[in-house]
Amino acid sequence: MSDVLTVSAELRERAGKGASRELRKQGRVPAVIYGNNKDPISIHLEEKLIIKYLNTGTFFDSEILVEVNGESIRTLPKDLQFHPVNDRPLHIDLFRIG
């Protein structure tokens, strides 16, 4: 792994298609943190920051330190879904590191 990227995130109160569309209109990307025998956490991240990290070329090789409610969670990007037409990030799956 080459880098440790730090991202601040906020918890999602609502889940589902409508809530995710609202977040994307606000420039946020819905995401989920799962793994390490703990409950999944639904969050959202800033789209501009994700695009900036994607353009470095080392996004999937990097450890991402997600800060949620004062807690730092070490994760690895597992999957990233893009819009088929405009290539904007739609959703990110992050795998929690134990």
Image (spheres, grey):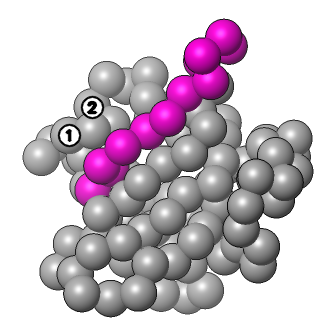
Q: Quadrant of residue 55?
A: top left
Q: Quadrant of the C terminus?
A: bottom left
Q: Residues within 10 Å of mark 2 (few under 14, many from 20)?
A: few
Residue 74 is a magenta residue: no
Closest to the observer, 18 or 27: 18
Magenta-drawn segment: 76-87
- Taking the spot 30% from the left edge, 63% from the top edge, the residue there is 95
Quadrant of the rendered image containing residue 70: bottom right
Check disc 1: other Cα within 10 Å, few if <14, some if 14-19, many if 20+.
few
Looking at the rendering, which quadrant does residue 10 occupy?
bottom right
Q: Are marks 2 and 1 in contact (CB under 8 Å)?
A: yes
Residue at x 68% of width, y 13% of height = 86
In this orientation, does residue 4 appear?
no
| Disc 1 target residue | 61
Location of mark 2 (residue): 58
Q: Is residue 69 visible?
A: yes
| Kind of residue indicated by mark 1 | Asp
Residue in front for this viewpoint, 17 or 88: 17
Residue at 43%, 39% (x, y): give it: 80
